[in-house]
């Protein structure tokens, strides 16, 4: 994987360097606490996102099992 400097990312992204996780508003995440994909609606800081049910989630592999773009999500559910 290519490491991306957090300073080069848009302010609407969350980045976890340790796990190479780059998440944008509009992406979908699969949370360990839920059995379904849920949309990212806000970025609080580089390590925390807000999802569609207004939960705040820490960006790490303990809480986020997988993530994908809105386009990938649309193709996978079609």
Image (cartoon, grey):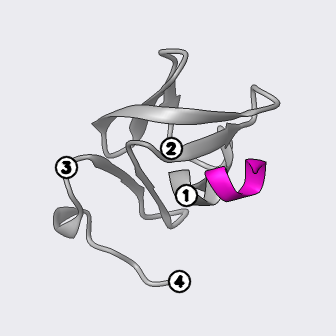
The answer to whether 58 appears left or right of 34 in the picture is: left
In front: label 1 or label 2:
1
Question: Disc 2, disc 3: CB below 8 Å?
Answer: no
- Locate residue 34 relative to residue 45 in the image: left or right: right
Residue hosting label 4: 1
Real-space Cα distance between discs 3 and 4? 21 Å
Q: How many numbered marks, from 0 up?
A: 4
Q: Crowding at label 2, few (<14), some or many (≥20) Cα neighbours within 10 Å?
A: many
Q: Residue furthest front?
A: 78
Locate residue 12, reporting x and y percent: 26, 46
Q: Which label number is shown at residue 59?
A: 2
Image quadrant where residue 50 sits: top left
Q: Position of residue 56 (x, y in %)?
A: 47, 23
- Real-space CA distance between mark 1 and mark 2, rounded to the nearest whole angstrom: 21 Å
- Disc 2 on helix, strand or loop? loop
Per the rendering, the mark at residue 71 is 1
Please name the residue shown 26% across and 71% down the image. 5
Q: Say whether residue 25 is magenta.
A: no
| In this rendering, position of residue 47 left or right of residue 54 | left
Q: Which residue is mark 3?
A: 11
CA gap, disc 4 to disc 2?
17 Å
Sooner in the amino-acid sequence: mark 1 or mark 3: 3
Q: Is residue 30 above or below residue 76?
A: above
Which residue is rendered at x = 38% and y = 42% of the image?
25
Q: Give whichever of 10, 70 is nearer the camera.
A: 70
Q: Look at the image and tell me whether residue 6 can be seen.
A: yes
N-term mark: 3 or 4: 4
Magenta highlight: main SS: helix
């Amino acid at each position: 994987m290519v490491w991306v400097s957090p300073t080069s990312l848009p302010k609407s992204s969350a980045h976890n360097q340790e796990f190479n996780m780059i998440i944008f508003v509009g992406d979908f995440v699969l949370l360990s606490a839920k059995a379904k994909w849920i949309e990212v609606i806000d970025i609080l800081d580089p390590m925390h996102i807000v999802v569609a049910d207004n939960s705040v989630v820490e960006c790490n592999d303990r809480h986020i099992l997988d993530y994908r773009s809105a386009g990938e999500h649309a193709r996978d559910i079609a």
